[in-house]
Amino acid sequence: MAIRICNIEDIKLGRAIRVKIGEHAFAIVHTPDGKFHALDDKCSHGEVSLSEGFVDNETIECWAHGAKFSLTTGSPLSLPAYEPVSVYEVFVENGEVFLEYEA
């Protein structure tokens, strides 16, 4: 099911926002090259919000301990994280951002 998240202008380039759907929190990321990504908003290393992290091209870095994750696969790219985070499909239609998610 596609869930409307926001307008594309609501997320600045190179930034992320936190979105909660029910009890599930997502980080919706707008990369510097204009792409959108979605992943779990919790670092697999600790209970830290990834949406507060640093976006760099196709990665996001946890602000607390510096673990980096791929925005396309969710794989950890640096320590201290060992476990991946889940990623979700995002698409843009008519200037709006949608997340594919089944609760």
Image: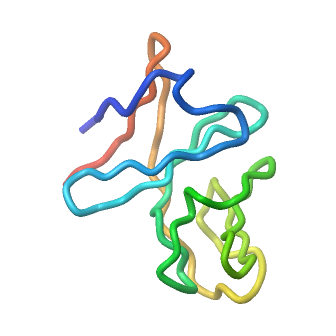
The picture quadrant where one finds residue 33 is top right
Q: Against 32, is 88 above or below?
A: below
Q: Against 101, is 87 above or below?
A: below
Q: How many marks?
A: 0
- Residue occupying image coordinates x 64% and y 88%: 82
In the image: residue 52, left or right of residue 63: left
Identify the image quadrant of the N terminus: top left
- Residue occupying image coordinates x 63% and y 54%: 72
- Residue occupying image coordinates x 65% and y 85%: 81
> Residue 71: horizontal and vertical position, in percent?
64, 55
Q: How is the image coloured?
A: rainbow
Q: Against 57, is 24 above or below?
A: below
> Residue 76: horizontal and vertical position, in percent?
68, 75
In the image: residue 49, left or right of residue 59: left
In the image: residue 3, left or right of residue 43: left
> Residue 102: horizontal and vertical position, in percent?
23, 51
Identify the image quadrant of the C terminus: bottom left
- Residue occupying image coordinates x 38% and y 48%: 19
Of 82 and 48, the residue lying toward us: 48
> Residue 58: horizontal and vertical position, in percent?
74, 51
